[in-house]
Each structure stands twice: as structure tokens, then as C-alpha cells.
């Protein structure tokens, strides 16, 4: 059902195949009111939407609509050939406290009118209710889910995650829904949180719910229709959204932007360049009849919403989703707070790519919590360097070129970094240690961060020297001002060993690069590594990744199984050995530490190498997914 095309943060661009119709996620379903739709289906389609959501309960309760839907089918009723998802009446249950239909009746109705995606009639528990009530309502939702999945005939069915603001109940709900085997997993009961700007609670619910959901099924954040949230929710793993806000806000005279919502009466300008906004002025818009004004606002609101969805997808392709999240977070203090809360979860590192097309931008103190920073600090522990430590201040990158020096056999030279804490010159080329940008100077948060990381790293060395400009870090060691005293013969072997350990894990560097020679470019960077006349691997110029050749594979396979390996199913071995990609449905086993875009070895069930390549998804994803490329093969070895 789902095929991943690009990854960034925990977000992904995927292609969903739904009854022969395709949706590209992240995707926004416009909510269609079958009784009084403010925009026509044709107008919605022209904006680029090929999937919509409507309410089966409303249709079922309206005699004329019910009759037509049963006779003609939902697609004919709405005049729409794309994907149609229907809500079951849960929103009305939340809004009015009850609905005049049973869970089985509304499921049968959704089946009979031919929807593509249906939803169970769950109990939308509000935030902060007594725990006893939340548990009782969750148990009822699970009971209904169990009955619904048994009764389901042919439609795709969504099992909604509930549990109020009790995170352990959210986890329980997610586990139960997965056990029952639904096709999609909406996270419900969160609209009241969004209405009250309780974004921190929202991200906790997303993370704790997403924790137990499978990678091969889409996650829908129910009721999230404001574009200021799309980037953050996507970065946390949400694939689908729905918007009734574009129409509801229009009727209330509200104008949506990615940074918030304006009331029309307060607007002197239209801060948008979409086709509708460039056709008039704020003053002219205010003078329109209400019906025309509502239509205009709805068209603008939906346009800005789909533009943001496209922007999110592009940022995932570019590897700049966290930068977009940071930009959107500046729209509201509570949204920025939510980003910080989200980044406090170390689990976000599990799906974070090891390299990206875009540089890492320091956008504020929250950047120090990003998965790339956490990963770097953790990977520093892989380096086993028995030398004297020398700490230098940041200069123009690449640092070694500006200083005209590298680590030597006696001195381990590092940069005290405001973004990554410590950057050893041995590994400075590895993404994102050179590929990052930050404003000049230091703020208090950065100083405290640097003190913590530098102190911990320096504690592993008997002798520490630090440049006098770094005295503000309170480093225990000997101060100096002349860097020339630490120059000497470059330790190429030590550099290669550090790169191998940092990239592939402790012990890999010595196995890969002992008794080798390096070809160094005119810029002073290591490009190729040989053992005699046999190529071990290439250090990629753009990001410092280690691309292995046959000799490198032989050496790295001395590490215990399954380190750095992906095991191909026997049915795929022949194809992969011919240089074709390994697909997710044919992965039997993998090193669970493999992250998206990491260089890996593909082996058969006997641990015989058949190819090297780039993992396009994480290990846990390639073992869960049934479609899409797991490893894009670079070199065949069979």
C-alpha cells in the first residue's frame, strides 16, 4: 500500500496505492460538506487535490443524500473520481455528545456507498478527562474496532488511536489497533488541543502513538487542517491531514496563512500572492457580498494549505524539513515550545538520515536538540584515540584547510563547536560536521552546551591543550595561543581509522584501513583508499560517506554478523547480484542500527556478499515495508 520515495526527520514522501488510485503523502484531504459545499469539486480538483474526505454520518442522516448515495455510489453523488474517505460520525459524537447510528450500521453504510477509506465509529475522548473515563471510553473504542474489522468486507478501514492526554493509554490504543490489523491509523481526539494551542501535548500524543504503529501503513492526524502545523507533524511521522478549516474559517471571515490566522476586518493588505489574492485588494474583498467573500476566503485558505503541503514534501526531498519546522515554529511561542518538546525525544534519531542534500542550519537553541547533534555526540564515543587533545576555536570551514593542519601522531586536534560541541579534524568531512552553518558569536545556551560536551570529551584524555580564546569554557588543561606548536606530519592512518569507526561503528576503522594507502586530492582531502592495487573504498567528497569496493567489503565483513549488513531473501539474490536494487519485501534481516541513506553491504542468508549500496530507508522500515527500494545497489559483487 505504501512506498517511500524520500526521507527526512521522521517524515517521508510516500506513494499510496488506494484501489488503483494514487496519493502522494504528506497529503491533505479537503473536507467536503455534501449539504452546503463552499467550493465546487471542480475548483478543488483544479487546485491539485485527488483525494477528499466527507462525512458518512451526515449523508446517512439526510434522506435524499442517503438514497442517492446508496443508488449511485459516493463517487457519483459527489462527482469525484479520486480517493474518497468518509468519517463515521465521531466528530458529531464529540460535538453533540451522541449520534443516531450504531458502529455496525455506519460501517455497513460506508461499505454500501463504495467509499475508498472508511473509519470506525470511535469514542473521541476529550483532553484531561478523568483517567477512569478515558480508560472506559478507550475500551469501548477497542471493542468497536474489533467488531468493525471482523465485519469489514472490501473497503480500507481506519482504526483511530484514542486515549485522551494519557500517553500510556495512547500507546495501548496504538498496540491494540495494530493487533487488529487496520489499513490506516488516524490519531484522534486532538482537535481541542489544537484549538487551545496546546501543541506540546499534541506532539507528545503523536510521538507516543507513532511509537507502536507499523511503517507500512499511513498515519493520519485527524482534524489537523492548519498549515502552520503540517511541517512539524510531518517531521514526527504523520502522513495524512484533513482540513475543514478552509471552509469554516472562511465563513467566519478568517484568512489563513502559514504563520497564523487573520480576521479579515483587520487586514489592510492581503499578504499572499496566490491567484485569488492578486486579483483584488483587502478593501475590495471586504465590500463583497458574504457569499462571494466566503468563496474567496475558502479558495485562498485551501490554496495556501496545499502550497504548504507541497513545500513540506519538497523540504523532505531536499533534506531541509527541520529547517522548515524551525521557520514555522517562530509563528507562535507555543509552537516553538512544542518543537523543543518533540526534540527532547531521543527516539527521533532512529529514522533520521545519515546524510542530506541540504546543509544543517542552526536556527536557534532548539537546533542543539536535533537528532543529528545527538547522533554525533553519541558517535564520538566510538573513537578510541590515545593522543594529547588540542582544542581550537571555530574558523572558516573546512577547518583543517584554514588552520593549515591536521591531527598528528602526537596530537588529536578538535574544534570546539557551538553546534556540535566537539568536531575532531579526523572526521570533519563527514556530514554534517562541515556541512552546517550558524551565526557568529556565542549565546548562553551554546556556551553551556559546549561546556558540557567539551568537558565530557576531554575527560578521556590525560593531556589537554586549549586555545586561549576558549578560556570561557572553563576547560581543565593548558592554555596556548600559538597553533604552530601543534603542527606536524599528518596522521592519515589515524584519520582513516576515525572515519571508519565514526561511520560504520567501533572497530570498523582498523579493519578497513590498516595497511592501506590514500590518494589525496589537490584540496588535501582523502578521496580513495587502496590496499596494494585493490580499491578499498572512496570517501565521497560531498558528505564524507565511505563508499565500499570489493576489498572494503571483505574487510568489513570481519565484523560480527549482522553489522552493516542487509540480508536479501533467496528469491532476490540473483537480481541483486546483477546490480538491481533490493526491495523491501525481499529483506530477511538487517543490522537494526542502519539508518536512511547509509552505505551498507547486501549479503545472502549465508553471509556471502552480493552487493554494496545505499540504504534508502532504516532497517526497521525495510523489514516492515512490502514495497519500495530498501537498498539502491552501487556495486555488484556476485
Image: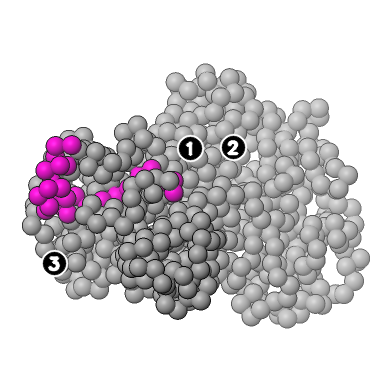
Q: Nearer the viewer, mark 2 or mark 1?
A: 2
Q: Residue at x 45, y 26 (%)?
A: 569
Q: Which residue is mark 1?
A: 590
Q: Considering the numbered disc 1 on the image, is that residue within a helix, a strand or a loop?
A: strand
Q: CA distance from mark 2 to mark 3?
A: 52 Å
Whole-percent x, y for residue 345 in the image: 46, 63
Is 178 within the magenta? no
Of residue 239 and residue 506, the one placed in the foreground of this image is 239
From what the image shows, is residue 197 above or below residue 230?
below
Q: Residue at x 52, y 20 (%)?
A: 575
Looking at the image, residue 110 sits to the left or right of residue 229; the answer is left
Numbered range of the magenta stretch: 47-72
Q: Nearer the viewer, mark 2 or mark 3?
A: 3
Q: Main secondary structure of the magenta part?
A: helix
Q: Which residue is mark 3?
A: 97
N-term mark: 2 or 1: 1
Q: Residue at x 83, y 50 (%)?
A: 491
Q: Which residue is mark 2?
A: 614
Q: CA distance from mark 2 to mark 1?
A: 13 Å
How packed is label 1: few (under 14 Cα within 10 Å), some, or many (20 or more)? Answer: many
Of residue 350 and residue 256, the one placed in the foreground of this image is 256
Q: Considering the numbered disc 2 on the image, is that residue within a helix, a strand or a loop?
A: strand
Whole-percent x, y for residue 98 in the image: 11, 63
Amino acid at each position: 500500500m505504501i512506498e517511500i520515495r524520500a526521507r527526512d526527520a521522521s517524515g517521508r514522501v510516500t506513494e499510496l496505492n488506494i484501489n488503483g488510485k494514487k496519493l502522494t503523502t504528506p497529503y491533505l484531504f479537503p473536507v467536503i460538506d455534501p449539504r452546503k459545499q463552499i467550493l465546487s469539486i471542480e475548483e478543488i480538483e483544479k487546485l491539485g487535490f485527488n483525494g477528499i474526505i466527507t462525512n458518512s454520518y451526515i449523508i446517512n442522516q439526510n434522506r435524499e443524500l442517503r438514497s442517492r448515495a446508496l443508488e449511485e455510489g459516493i463517487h457519483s453523488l459527489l462527482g469525484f473520481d479520486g480517493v474518497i474517505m468518509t468519517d463515521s460520525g465521531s466528530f458529531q459524537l464529540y460535538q453533540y455528545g451522541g449520534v443516531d447510528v450504531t458502529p455496525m450500521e455506519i460501517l455497513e453504510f460506508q461499505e454500501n456507498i463504495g467509499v475508498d477509506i472508511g473509519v470506525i465509529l470511535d469514542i473521541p475522548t476529550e483532553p484531561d478527562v478523568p483517567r477512569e473515563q478515558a480508560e472506559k471510553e478507550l475500551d469501548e473504542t477497542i471493542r468497536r474496532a474489533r467488531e468493525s474489522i471482523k465485519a469489514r468486507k472490501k473497503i480500507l478501514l481506519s482504526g483511530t488511536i484514542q486515549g485522551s492526554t494519557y500517553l500510556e493509554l495512547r500507546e495501548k490504543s496504538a498496540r491494540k489497533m495494530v493487533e487488529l490489523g487496520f489499513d490506516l491509523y488516524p490519531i484522534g481526539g486532538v482537535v481541542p488541543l489544537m484549538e487551545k494551542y496546546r501543541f506540546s501535548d499534541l506532539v507528545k500524543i503523536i510521538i507516543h502513538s507513532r511509537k507502536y504503529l507499523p511503517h507500512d501503513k499511513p498515519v493520519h492526524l485527524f482534524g489537523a487542517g492548519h498549515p502552520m502545523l503540517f511541517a512539524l507533524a510531518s517531521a514526527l511521522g504523520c502522513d495524512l491531514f484533513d482540513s475543514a478549516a478552509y471552509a469554516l474559517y472562511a465563513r467566519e471571515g478568517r484568512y489563513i496563512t502559514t504563520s497564523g490566522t487573520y480576521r479579515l476586518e483587520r487586514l489592510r493588505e492581503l499578504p499572499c500572492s496566490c491567484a485569488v489574492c492578486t486579483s483584488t485588494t483587502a478593501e475590495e474583498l471586504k465590500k463583497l457580498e458574504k457569499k462571494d467573500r466566503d468563496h474567496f476566503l475558502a479558495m485562498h485558505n485551501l490554496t495556501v494549505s496545499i502550497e504548504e503541503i507541497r513545500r513540506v514534501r519538497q523540504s523532505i526531498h531536499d533534506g531541509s524539513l527541520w529547517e522548515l519546522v524551525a521557520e514555522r515554529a517562530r509563528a507562535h511561542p507555543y509552537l516553538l515550545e512544542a518543537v523543543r518538546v518533540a526534540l527532547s525525544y531521543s527516539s527521533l534519531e532512529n529514522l533520521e538520515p545519515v546524510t542530506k542534500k541540504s546543509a544543517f542550519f542552526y536556527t536557534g537553541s532548539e537546533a542543539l536538540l536535533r537528532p543529528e547533534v545527538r547522533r554525533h555526540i553519541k558517535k564520538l564515543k566510538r573513537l578510541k584515540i590515545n593522543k594529547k587533545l588540542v582544542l581550537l576555536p571555530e574558523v572558516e570551514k573546512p577547518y583543517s584547510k584554514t588552520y593549515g593542519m591536521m591531527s598528528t601522531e602526537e596530537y588529536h586536534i578538535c574544534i570546539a563547536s557551538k553546534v556540535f560541541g566537539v568536531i575532531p579534524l579526523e572526521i570533519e568531512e563527514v556530514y554534517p560536521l562541515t556541512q552546517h552553518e550558524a551565526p557568529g558569536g556565542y549565546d548562553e545556551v551554546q556556551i553551556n552546551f559546549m561546556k558540557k560536551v567539551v568537558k565530557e570529551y576531554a575527560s578521556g584524555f590525560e593531556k589537554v591543550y586549549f586555545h586561549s580564546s576558549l578560556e570561557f569554557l572553563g576547560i581543565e588543561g593548558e592554555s596556548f595561543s600559538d597553533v604552530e606548536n601543534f603542527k606536524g606530519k599528518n596522521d592519515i592512518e589515524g584519520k582513516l581509522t576515525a572515519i571508519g569507526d565514526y561511520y560504520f561503528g567501533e572497530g570498523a576503522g582498523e579493519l578497513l584501513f590498516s595497511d592501506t594507502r590514500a590518494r589525496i586530492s589537490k584540496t588535501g582531502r582523502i578521496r580513495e583508499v587502496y590496499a596494494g592495487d585493490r580499491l578499498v573504498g572512496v570517501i565521497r567528497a560531498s558528505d564524507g560517506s565511505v563508499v565500499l569496493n570489493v576489498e572494503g567489503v571483505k574487510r568489513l565483513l570481519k565484523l560480527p554478523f549482522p553489522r552493516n549488513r542487509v540480508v536479501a531473501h533467496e528469491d532476490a539474490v540473483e537480481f541483486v547480484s546483477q546490480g538491481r536494487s533490493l526491495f523491501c519485501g525481499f529483506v530477511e534481516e538487517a543490522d537494526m542500527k542502519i539508518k536512511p541513506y547509509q552505505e551498507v553491504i547486501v549479503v545472502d542468508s549465508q553471509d556471502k556478499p552480493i552487493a554494496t549500496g545505499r540504504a534508502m530507508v532504516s532497517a526497521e522500515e525495510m523489514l516492515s515495508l512490502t514495497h519500495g527500494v530498501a537498498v539502491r545497489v552501487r556495486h555488484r559483487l556476485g
